[in-house]
Image (tube, helix red, strand yellow):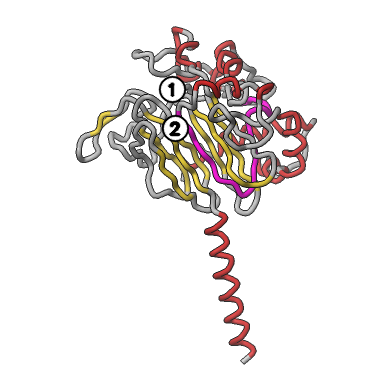
Amino acid sequence: MGSSSTTLFAIFLLCTFQQKGIVDAATFTFLNKCSQTVWPAILGHPPMETTGFELPKGGSRAFQAPTGWSGRFWGRTGCTFDGSGRGSCATGDCGSGQTECNGAGSTAATLAEFTLGSGSMDFYDVSLVDGYNLPVMVDVSGGSGQCESTGCAEDLNILCPAELRTKDGGACRSACDAYGSPEYCCREEYGSPATCKPSAYSQVFKNACPKSYSYAYDDATSTFTCTGASYLITFCPNHQSKKSSKPSDATANGSESEGGSGVGSESGSMPEAMLADGSWLANLAIGGSTRTSSFGTTFQIVSVVVHLASTVVLML
């Protein structure tokens, strides 16, 4: 009798936790404020219900993320697909030849990257490391912690150096993509924070969008955390929100600012929060070792791991 009661109680607890997991799961909502249709692309693990879809001007669509999801989102533009979903895009193209990306990535695209915690902190950023094609902002709904908004509301295609522009001018390549040299790609002898420094090209991105990742070893101003939140990814946020992408104009919370999508408060407290709550990720990055010369080095490693976490899904 006691054994049966214990079993029933265990089943009850399991169902309760499963239901709680459903309630607490992060929701990603995509909003298109561009003057054209955007085809959002999704690359991540575990799989979502789609890896690519059409989002008309003014349209929105929401997805619930699987627990522990890690990956990236970006917008494709100038796409032409036939009735069977076959075709290609002018910018951000997956290379899959279909509306669905089916595990294929892209370069010269603005990326919104996430690593969701399982009952712990989410890590997220907007990255220009692989280039730029659209203004993208990430705003936070609910959750606890800093939960700042971030992104790049500027039109970097206007600022793009001529040698990095794509043929049609619809996107701006990264210096790594354009030249493939170790110093721009932060690899080989430049594969560490000590040897890979911001280039003149990455500084163009960083100056325009100081909250966004601009190169592989970008600093603490580019990675953000929140717990138990849902996220709004806006393509082409309102023009008046562009000023909000500067740290000095940041809002104090993750809700959408008066002009559309703002960014959160200055990230001066970010290193302290990461040290207190994100040490598990630093240990993961260095194989559990605590041998670091300073907190700055540790945080750089953490930032890089968070930024690259969505890339790991390519190998899964």
Q: Which residue is mark 2?
A: 74
Q: Are marks 1 and 2 in contact (CB under 8 Å)?
A: yes
Residue at left offset 49%, top offset 52%:
66
Q: Which residue is mark 1?
A: 133
Mark-to-mark CA distance, 1 and 2: 9 Å
Q: Residues within 10 Å of mark 1 (few under 14, many from 20)?
A: many
Image quadrant in which you'd find residue 87: top left
| Closest to the observer, 293 or 15 | 15
Which numbered disc, 1 or 2, marks the residue that appears first in the sequence? Answer: 2
Q: Position of residue 180 (x, y in %)?
A: 48, 18
Residue 21 appears left or right of 271: left
Residue at left offset 46%, top offset 11%:
158
Q: Residue furthest left?
A: 83
160 over 107 or under it: above or below: above
Q: Residue furthest front?
A: 258
Q: Residues within 10 Å of mark 2 (few under 14, many from 20)?
A: many
Residue 3 visible, this angle: yes
| Closest to the observer, 309 or 86 | 86
Residue 168 appears left or right of 4: left
For the residue labelled by badge 2, is the local secondary structure a helix, a strand or a loop? strand
Residue 189 visible, this angle: no
| Closest to the observer, 247 or 291 | 247
Could you tell me which quadrant the N terminus lies in?
A: bottom right
Residue 239 counted in the magenta span: no
Q: Position of residue 291 (x, y in %)?
A: 77, 37
Bounds of the magenta segment: 215-235
The kind of residue on which mark 2 rests is Trp
